[in-house]
């Protein structure tokens, strides 16, 4: 008999979105029981790695305004963002910045004591609200401390969620407790998926190794659409060779990108914004410089460019970029006070995710999604930096409140979960993966998949490369890799790794099929064989639905409320 744990609201994932959702749900109805399930200890969630800022309009008296933030977000999205969603983000964020402040968030301050903001790419005003260069860590600590004040929030650390249980409504999830290896059912009338992005389907990536698409794949296998998965953000400044992020705040503070001729080459590509053009623009510019022979050769053999911060001076660097300096010394052997650091565009964010509406509601009644796991189309084809932590916090609160209201209204109508669904899931993971057999090393499969994604689905793409990558991913998927050599029950990371690889292969396939179908260049999706944006045929969202033979693709309209598409120039 499978153990069952019951709550009123289940939140899968304990990053910024998950914790903000937990607080909102717990505060909406103190009689509800909120379960937060995470495959890592809460403060190990990848949100702690966010460095640069959280976007909000705070100083309208100094010339900034909300309409400007809305337009910058829509233009940054290459006009694929849903405009009502961008508006909701912008209008909610000032409250959230001050709410965090009241909960104890140590925002960096101006000399007069007011909250400080720095410049970020694609914005008309400095509106990245920051805390040195560790904003995600401090936001997570603030939210986690606030969660601990609520008696009705219960944390389940180091549980691996495997499937969504459903009929016509959300009914719960299945999960494995890593400590014991026990398979368990969690029941609840309402749920929120906050499991983050899929960035580890690439080798050169800023993501934690735990950032695999388990939550996206759970939703996909449960019949929900993944939306706009072809749009992968490559951040301009991943340090060589690890890919660890150098925050956009480094350029916001005045850092220069230079080529091997010592030129600030962004003057050729975005003279109005220079290094603070949107990320897709800067990354493409960097790759063009490299392709035209103006890059540096890193000792690993990869080409790169350099980020120069030396002119900022040691005092300013120690004050606002201390974490970046430490990362440079530890992982690249470079002190940014004294010399430029080698960087290259790196996989950093997925604009796509689980298809959701403006409220974060999925296609399954009773289930919401928030943060990077969600695609409510805030970011369209390209996200502006500092809008992601904002999105996590805004829709964490929105989905937490709505899920709590749904749970309160449906507490008395909890129906029995289908035993056949539970049995099918046990069979899938234990017979299909744990007790599987095969001659192929799953870790070699993972490496081959991530390498082909790096090579063929990077900043620039084309039909030939994407098709060969899709062929390779499908070959890897079909190969005899589904087996777990470690037969231990407790803390079997071999087992969880194999489950992760299973999700990664399906998700990579969705990214590639979406990229092949979108025969245009828009935002972060840049095709050399279809080099222009094609609004006539592709001003629409991509939807992917699961079938055993690969994703079934469909389209979904973009919501326009205020701005018609124009050419993006910076």
Image (cartoon, rainbow, N blue to C red):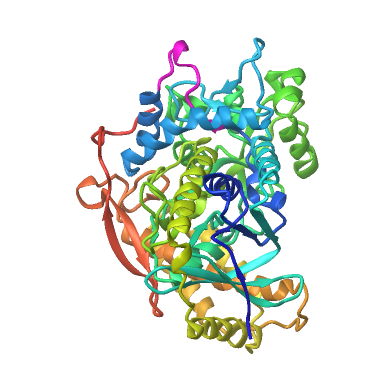
Q: Is residue 531 above or below residue 121?
A: below
Horizontal side, residue 360 vs residue 21: left or right: left
In percent of width and height, residue 40 lies at 70, 59
Can residue 61 be seen in the rendering of this structure? yes
Q: Nearer the viewer, residue 32 or 20?
A: 32
Q: Is residue 232 above or below residue 188?
A: above
Q: Toward which corner of the image does residue 447 lie, by quadrant?
A: bottom right
Horizontal side, residue 125 vs residue 346: left or right: left
Can residue 443 be seen in the rendering of this structure? no
| Quarter occupied by the N terminus | bottom right
Q: Is residue 57 magenta?
A: yes
In percent of width and height, residue 50 lies at 63, 41
Q: Toward which corner of the image does residue 194 lie, by quadrant?
A: bottom right
Horizontal side, residue 165 vs residue 334: left or right: left
Horizontal side, residue 397 vs residue 19: left or right: left
Q: Which residue appears at 58% of the width and 49% of the height?
A: 30
Q: Is residue 273 above or below residue 357?
A: above
Q: Toward which corner of the image does residue 492 lie, by quadrant?
A: bottom right
**How many labels sit on residues?**
0
| Quarter occupied by the C terminus | top left
Magenta span of residues: 54-65
In percent of width and height, residue 399 lies at 47, 49
In percent of width and height, residue 309 lies at 67, 25
Q: Nearer the viewer, residue 308 or 26?
A: 26
Q: Is residue 128 magenta?
A: no
Q: Nearer the viewer, residue 70 or 2?
A: 2
Residue with the most extreme left position: 536
């Amino acid at each position: 008999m499978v153990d069952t744990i019951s709550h009123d609201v289940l939140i899968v994932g304990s990053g910024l979105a998950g914790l903000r959702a937990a607080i909102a749900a717990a505060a909406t109805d103190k009689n509800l029981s909120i379960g937060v399930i995470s495959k890592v200890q809460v403060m190990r969630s990848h949100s702690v790695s966010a460095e640069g800022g959280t976007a909000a309009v705070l100083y309208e008296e100094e010339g900034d305004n909300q309409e400007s933030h809305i337009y910058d977000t829509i233009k940054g999205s290459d006009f694929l963002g849903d405009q009502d969603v961008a508006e909701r983000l912008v209008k909610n964020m000032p409250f959230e910045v001050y709410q965090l402040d009241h909960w104890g968030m140590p925002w960096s301050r101006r000399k007069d004591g007011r909250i400080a903001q720095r410049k970020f790419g694609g914005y008309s005003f400095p509106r990245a609200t920051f805390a040195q260069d560790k904003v995600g860590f401090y936001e997570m600590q603030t939210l986690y401390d606030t969660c601990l004040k609520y008696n009705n929030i219960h944390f389940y650390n180091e549980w691996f969620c495997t499937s969504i249980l459903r009929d016509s409504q959300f009914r719960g999830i299945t999960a494995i407790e890593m400590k014991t290896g026990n398979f368990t059912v969690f029941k609840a009338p309402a749920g929120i998926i906050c499991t983050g992005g899929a960035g580890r389907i690439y080798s050169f990536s800023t993501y934690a190794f735990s950032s695999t698409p388990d939550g996206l794949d759970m939703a996909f296998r449960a019949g929900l659409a993944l939306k706009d998965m072809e749009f992968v953000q490559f951040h301009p400044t991943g340090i060589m060779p690890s890919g660890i992020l150098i925050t956009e705040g480094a350029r916001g503070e005045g850092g220069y990108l230079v080529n091997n001729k010592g030129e600030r080459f962004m003057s050729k590509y975005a003279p109005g914004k220079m290094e603070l053009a949107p990320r897709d623009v800067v990354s493409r510019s960097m790759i063009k410089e490299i392709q035209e022979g103006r890059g540096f050769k890193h000792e690993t053999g990869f080409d790169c460019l350099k980020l120069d911060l030396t002119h900022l001076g040691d005092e300013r660097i120690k004050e606002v970029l201390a974490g970046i300096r430490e990362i440079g010394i530890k992982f690249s052997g470079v002190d940014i006070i004294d010399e430029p650091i080698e960087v290259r565009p790196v996989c950093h964010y997925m604009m796509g995710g689980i298809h959701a509406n403006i409220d974060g509601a999925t296609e399954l009644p009773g289930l919401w999604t928030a943060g990077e796991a969600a695609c409510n189309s805030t970011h369209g084809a390209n996200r502006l930096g500092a809008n992601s932590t904002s999105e996590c916090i805004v829709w964490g609160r929105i989905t937490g409140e709505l899920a709590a209201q749904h749970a309160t209204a449906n507490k008395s109508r909890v129906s029995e979960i289908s035993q056949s669904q539970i049995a099918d899931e046990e069979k899938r993971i234990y017979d299909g993966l744990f007790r599987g057999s095969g001659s192929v090393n799953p870790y070699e499969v993972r490496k081959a998949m991530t390498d082909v994604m790096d090579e063929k689905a990077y900043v620039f793409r084309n039909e030939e490369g994407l098709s060969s990558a899709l062929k390779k991913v499908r070959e890897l998927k079909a190969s005899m890799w589904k087996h777990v050599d470690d037969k231990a029950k407790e803390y079997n990371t071999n087992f969880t790794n194999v489950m992760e690889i299973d999700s990664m292969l399906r998700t990579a396939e969705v990214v590639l099929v979406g990229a092949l179908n979108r025969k245009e260049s828009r935002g972060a999706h840049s095709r050399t064989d279809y080099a222009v944006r094609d609004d006539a045929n592709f001003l629409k969202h991509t939807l992917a639905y699961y079938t055993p033979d690969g994703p079934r693709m469909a389209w979904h309209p973009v919501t326009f409320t205020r701005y018609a598409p124009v050419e993006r120039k910076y």
